[in-house]
Image: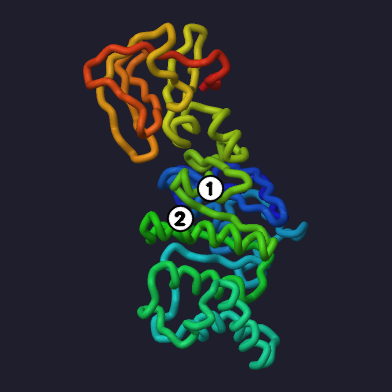
Amino acid sequence: MICLSGVAKSFGGPAAVDGVDLEIGEGEIFCLLGPSGCGKTTLLRLIGGFEAPDAGRIELDGKDVTQAPPWARPVNTVFQSYALFPHLDVARNVRFGLETLDMTDAERDARVAEMLALVKLGDFAKRKPSQLSGGQRQRVAIARALARHPRVLLLDEPLSALDRKLREETRLELVELQARLGIAFVFVTHDQDEAMAISDRVGVMEKGKIVQIATPTELYERPASKFVAEFVGRVNLIARPEGGWLALRPEKLTLFQGPHKGRVRECQYLGERRLVFLDTSFGTLTASAAGDAPIPANGTEIAFGWAENAGSVIAR
């Protein structure tokens, strides 16, 4: 569906995208995850045609689109800022991208109604963007992007402006929407929870390179590097005598039993769980316990350990 080969892009300094090879399948939700400045948005813009690569090749459906402009690609983009026209109502915002297509007015009206029904905004067609909530404006932007029936939908941090509860609700709606449409979604985010919750596969980016591509489970349980282990969730990194690290997630540590001793430094209550910070000979380690679990007072020494196969060994 999408194939990138040796794609590179620089803006005069270090490479923003540095020789990326990537394949994304039809109907897949693929997430580009990484910190600010890692190149994920630039890579999305290259796929969308908003930037031209300095090197490499971009194919969509087996066709070379490396130098094709955005309007000549079977993709559409949902931007972080929504980019809605404030003077147009919802229906006309969605209709805007259809004006250049060979359609009758009746066909355009039907397509607009279809898209608004798809995002559950059929009753809001005459409202202006300023009369909508953030989540509703986001759905208008998605409806507009889908109106041209793209083969791929690109989403650039589309939920970053929403509060936590609304983000969770909207990402669930996105997954349900993608399942109904069956088209590929390429999603850019720096939010690891978001990436893990919605993706079929995740590509973690660091300094312009994709350093690991895996399913959310594989990424969490078997990180390929120290950077990935630390970026994707909480992790305890214990140096190994033979080199590298043992990566242990907090829930892998058992409290009150095991061969090691630690002193409780602090306990943080997070509702369904508690995070327990232990000062140990390995450094400060973090354990996760049930929210209603009994936790000793700060300064108490307790035993802890982990199962033999609990961690993942990483070499770099």
Q: Amino acid at mark 1?
A: Ala
Q: Which mark is residue 197?
A: 1
- The residue that appears at 50% across and 12% down in the rendered structure is 243
Where does the image place residue 7, in percent across and percent down from the top left?
62, 48
Q: Which mark is residue 291?
A: none
Q: Amino acid at mark 2?
A: Glu
Asked which quadrant contains residue 230, the reply is top left
**What residue occupies the far bottom of the structure in this picture?**
105
Does residue 271 lie above or below 3 as drawn?
A: above
Where does the image place residue 215, in percent across and percent down from the top left?
62, 40
Where does the image place residue 267, in percent across and percent down from the top left?
28, 28
- The residue that appears at 68% across and 52% down in the rendered structure is 57
Secondary structure type for disc 2: helix
The residue wearing badge 2 is: 168
Q: Which corner quadrant holds the N terminus?
A: bottom right
Secondary structure type for disc 1: helix
- How many marks overall? 2
